[in-house]
């Protein structure tokens, strides 16, 4: 399964250098030709906490939006 723009995902791997921890929720904001995804992680106020290019294996779907 691949993700599409604006899908909500959850990090399954920490990227300490980018400030990303396992379990953080993010949104796919770009899809690169090499198969990586640019993911933006925000707090509840909508402020960006981190952005990183991540592989499919580092992400799972957060499920249907509420």
Image: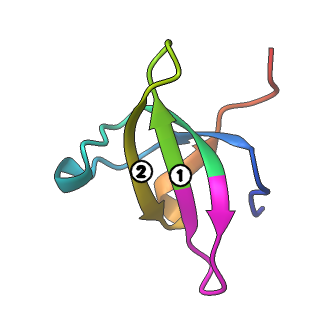
**Element at badge 2?**
strand
The answer to the question of whether label 2 and label 1 lie on touching residues, with beta carbons closer than 8 A, is: yes
Q: Is residue 30 left or right of residue 13?
A: right
* Magenta residue check for 56: no
Give the image location of residue 15, x and y in percent.
26, 52
Give the image location of residue 17, x and y in percent.
17, 55
The C terminus is located in which quarter? top right
Tell me, for residue 3, which label it has, or none. none
Residue at 44 percent of width and 20 percent of height: 43
Residue at the disc numbered 2: 51
Residue at the disc numbered 1: 39
Give the image location of residue 54, x and y in percent.
47, 63
Comes first in the chain, label 2 or label 1:
1
46, above or below 10, in the image:
above
* Magenta residue check for 32: yes
Residue at 75 percent of width and 63 percent of height: 2
Given the current orientation, which residue lies at the most extreme left position?
17
Report the Cα–Cα distance between label 2 and label 1. 6 Å
15, above or below 42, in the image:
below
The 10 Å Cα crowd at callout 1, few under 14, some 14 to 19, many 20 or more, is: many
Give the image location of residue 36, x and y in percent.
56, 72
Residue at 66 percent of width and 85 percent of height: 33
Residue at 82 percent of width and 27 percent of height: 64
The N terminus is located in which quarter? bottom right
Q: Is residue 66 left or right of residue 15?
A: right
* Residue sitting nearer the eye, 35 or 43: 43
Q: Is residue 21 left or right of residue 40?
A: left
- Part of the protein shown in magenta: 29-38
52, above or below 60, in the image:
below
């Amino acid at each position: 399964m691949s993700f599409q723009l604006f899908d909500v995902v959850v990090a399954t791997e920490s990227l300490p250098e980018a400030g990303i921890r396992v379990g953080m929720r993010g949104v796919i904001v770009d899809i690169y030709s090499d198969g990586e995804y640019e993911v933006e992680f925000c707090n509840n106020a909508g402020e960006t906490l981190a952005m990183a290019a991540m592989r499919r294996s580092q992400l799972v779907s957060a499920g249907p939006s509420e």
